[in-house]
Amino acid sequence: MTETSVPPTGTSAELLLDAVSRSYGENLAVRSISAEVPASKISVIVGPSGCGKSTLLRIISGLDEPTSGRVEFEGVPVKGVPEGLAMVFQDYSRSLFPWMRVDKNVAFPIKHLPAKERAERVRFAMQEVGLSGKEKLYPWQMSGGMQQRVAIARALASHPKLLLMDEPYASVDAQTRADLEDLLMRIQAELGITVLVVTHDIDESVYLADRIIVLSAPPSVVTEVIEVDLPRPRDHIATKTDPRFVEIRGHVTRLLRSKEHAAPV
Amino acid sequence: MTIQQGSEVHVPLSAPESEAVEERAAVPAPPRRTLRTGFPWPVTVLLRLVAPAAIIGIWYLISQRERSGLFVKDPLTSFERFVEDFLSGDASRLFLGDATFDHLFPSVGRALAGLGIAIVVGVVIGVLLGISPVMTALFQPLVHLGRSLPSPALLGVFFFLFGTGDSPKIFLIAFSVVWPILLNTIDGVSSIGQTRAQAAQVFRIPGRDVLTHIVLPGAAPKIFAGIRTSLSFSLILMIISELQKSENGLGYLLIQSQRTFDYAGFWAVLIVLVILGVAFNTIFLAIERRALAWHRGATQQND
Ligand SMILES: Nc1ncnc2c1ncn2[C@@H]1O[C@H](COP(=O)(O)OP(=O)(O)O)[C@@H](O)[C@H]1O
Ligand SMILES: [Mg+2]
């Protein structure tokens, strides 16, 4: 089943997962995941809580190693954190550095660059996330939504080719979340970066994705890969009332339902 | 580990790109003096003077009693003696008395030297142990053993090891006060959190920057708390180390004045010690307030 779920090897695959598994001692968290993440698109991994989404992102970013299987980024096997990769964590308050002002947080990963270029990148990234003028605040002086924007700006400033996001909007309110979803799609379209978002929110996955990778309950495998052909730019009202959106959402919901209750083989 | 929230399907409201800037009160907190007690500052200052005034009053009453008055000199006499011994020089000596140069400065110098060594050693070893769980597990028993040794009892050992000059005293102070700093540094380093460590890794921050910009600032609140404890310890140990085999210092002066039945001199030294304790603490708080401005703000916001 895992084989059939991988579409024919595309030419523009930025990231390739090949039969990746990960166990913690006796506990098999990820059984076998094969998937391709196309370049310059938004791909979303959706699956129930505890199915190994964060584990998978850690493996992709080289923070963790798979028990078996292989990960390739731009055709090169991942060993350690690859260059050109940035990550936005779910828990913004724990991933930003509260002792640095916002501009320093954003500039920190590109500290090695000349001051002039660094300043320019910070300015651009802050503008992209709509936070111009907030550079001198501390993260803890900001709301959750603003802090997550800072985290996105920090990722953008490093000029990533691949942006990984682990449930980036799970801890912000619905309105802010809608804003940040649109923000992400706008930035992705502008900069053409490859984005891989992990979420357990079905609406969010369909709304954001060009491709949805649906995971089963643990020990997880890829249940299905869905190409989302909804037109862009997307809009919270127009897109979400599109019959096609409703149809895909229903389909993903059914997949997650059936798998969540199915006993692992 | 991140906290997972139960899956819920959210229904986003229509959002016409509202750059709704949800800024929390980013205004710096109003001056703390009025904030904390709710009184204007002259009242606060008066309130703070109540306890010292009461102590001086009781001191006076005891000194007036026939039996205890022999040993307990009254506050005024003691204070006059303090001024005479410690504050009665001419301009060329910055108006400081002989006792200041002969006893106060050597004492303070040894206390600060011991404290300085303790800070450096405590932070360096604490960071080494804190970043590695294996090292922590390996050395934790040793640390707890060292901490629970009654260090004043080891003074003899230090005399034996380092001779009779300043070094045994400095090392006794350093050895005694290093533990709170060491334990707090270990604690502080592990309090920085897995997510921040992962963020540093993903952004390929070089090890040196991780140390100076993440580990040390992240552990700083705990380190400062440790230093504060050690600060008062160091004054106590300073006195204890000067009670034997000493030629100068406030501890020496205490013993000496008692032996010669110079009770006014004895009480004058106690006044110096009180002033010293208050001064150390005030300077420390000023430094901490500057270094940890972010931390005060962050914890206030999270309350
Ligand atoms: N460091 C770890 N040690 C042991 N088990 C882990 C660890 N990290 C994750 N797991 C286990 O792996 C499974 C998947 O976890 P995770 O990747 O966090 O899931 P998700 O992000 O999809 O909610 C869980 O059952 C979890 O208990
Ligand atoms: Mg997760």
Image (cartoon, coloured by chain):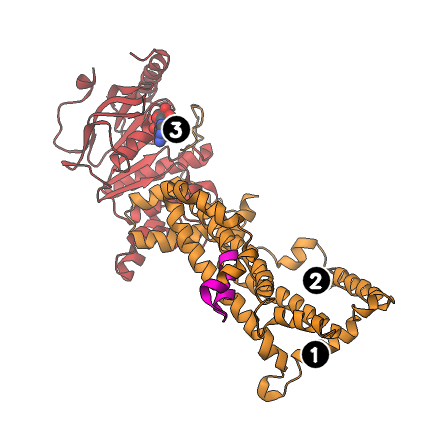
Chain colours: A red, B orange
- The amino acid pointed to by label 3 is Ile
Whether marks 3 and 1 lie on the same chain = no
The percent position of residue B10, horizontal first and vertical second, equals: 43, 26
Magenta span: predominant SS is: helix
- Tell me where the magenta segment starts and ends, as one range: B159-176
The percent position of residue A236, horizontal first and vertical second, equals: 38, 30
Q: Which mark is residue A237?
A: 3
Q: Chain of mark 3?
A: A
Is A251 positioned to the left or the right of A161 in the image? Answer: right
Q: Label 3: state its secondary structure.
A: loop
Mark 2 neighbour class, 10 Å CA radius: few under 14, some 14 to 19, many 20 or more: some
Q: Residue at x 28, y 35 (%)?
A: A64
Nearer mark to the viewer, of 1 and 2: 1
The percent position of residue B175, horizontal first and vertical second, equals: 49, 57
Whether marks 1 and 2 lie on the same chain = yes
Contact flag, marks 2 and 3 (Cβ < 8 Å): no
Q: Label 1: which residue?
A: B83
Q: Which mark is residue B41?
A: 2
Relative to A61, is A251 above or below? above
Q: Nearer the viewer, residue B159 or A96?
A: B159
